[in-house]
Image: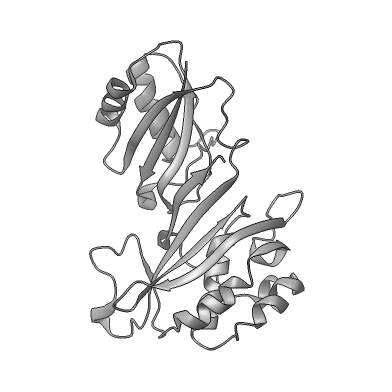
Amino acid sequence: MRYRMLVAYDGTDFHGWQTQNRPEKSSLRTVQEVMEKAITTVVREPVNVIGASRTDSGVHANGQVATFASSNEINPEKLIMGINSWLPDDVQVRSIETTHDKFNPIDDCTSKGYIYSLAHGCSNPLRKPLFDRRFISHTAFELDPELMNQGAKLFEGEHDFIGFTKLNHGRITTVRRIDACSVQATGDGRLAIYVSGAGFLWNMVRIISGTLLEVGRGKFKPEDITDIIASGDRRRGGKTLPAHGLSLEWVSFD
């Protein structure tokens, strides 16, 4: 029996989603690892948990989709209670349902949506995130969300994003499609950068967000985004913003 799960986690204390095997060294704590341990305890057999997105170290998720198979058929309501009782406080299974045997959240995924949360104008210490500091990045610059949103629209469509990833990205192609990109003020010196698309390169959303930050503070003009993408030069874009501001919000299989 194959099960499909909706998973949320606080990525602060995780070294990303994917299990990292390090010969002769202690293993790093990952979301996949703690989930496999919890589920194995409940179903009483080893399982392999596959997630739609291999989120990086420190990145959060509200809408990760994952799957595992078991020879045991268990009522999903009982299964979710059992798994959550064994999971640490920074991971939660939101829902579980049975699915077809060939379901693969990586291969079957058609699009993913991310949000980068940013507080700005934080030269005033009282405007810096406090209780939610693990989930929102901050900058001392005052940003213009309208200009950022104009620049964001120029990321939409299919482009070669080689200038928006690490040099050792390890991908055969760096061409990706952005379905939607926008910036919205969320109140009291805070904004959200929304990015969705079919797939993303390593650090791509964080570099897009860092580039839009430069638009917001006036270093770049919105129309500069087109030239920066076309250049393919990582040095032309903004900084890679910290991981803790990023969250995987949803995964679509339409």
Q: Is residue 86 left or right of residue 165?
A: left
Q: Is residue 110 left or right of residue 87?
A: right
Work out which residue is located at the far bottom of the displayed protein and give it: 218
Tell me where residue 133 sits by quadrant: bottom left
Tell me where residue 245 sits by quadrant: bottom left
Between 200 and 203, the residue placed more toward the observer is 200
Is residue 5 among what the camera can see? yes
Residue 99: where, in percent of width, then height?
A: 49, 24
Between 187 and 254, the residue placed more toward the observer is 254
Between 179 and 176, the residue placed more toward the observer is 179
Residue 125: where, in percent of width, then height?
A: 26, 81
| Whether residue 202 is situated above or below residue 187 in the rendered picture | above
Q: Which residue corresponds to the image point at 45% horizontal and 79% vertical from the top-left?
A: 145
Q: Is residue 188 left or right of residue 98?
A: left
In the rendered image, the quadrant that contains the C terminus is: top right
Is residue 27 among what the camera can see? no
Residue 247: where, in percent of width, then height?
A: 43, 55
Residue 63: where, in percent of width, then height?
A: 42, 45
Tell me where residue 228 sits by quadrant: bottom right
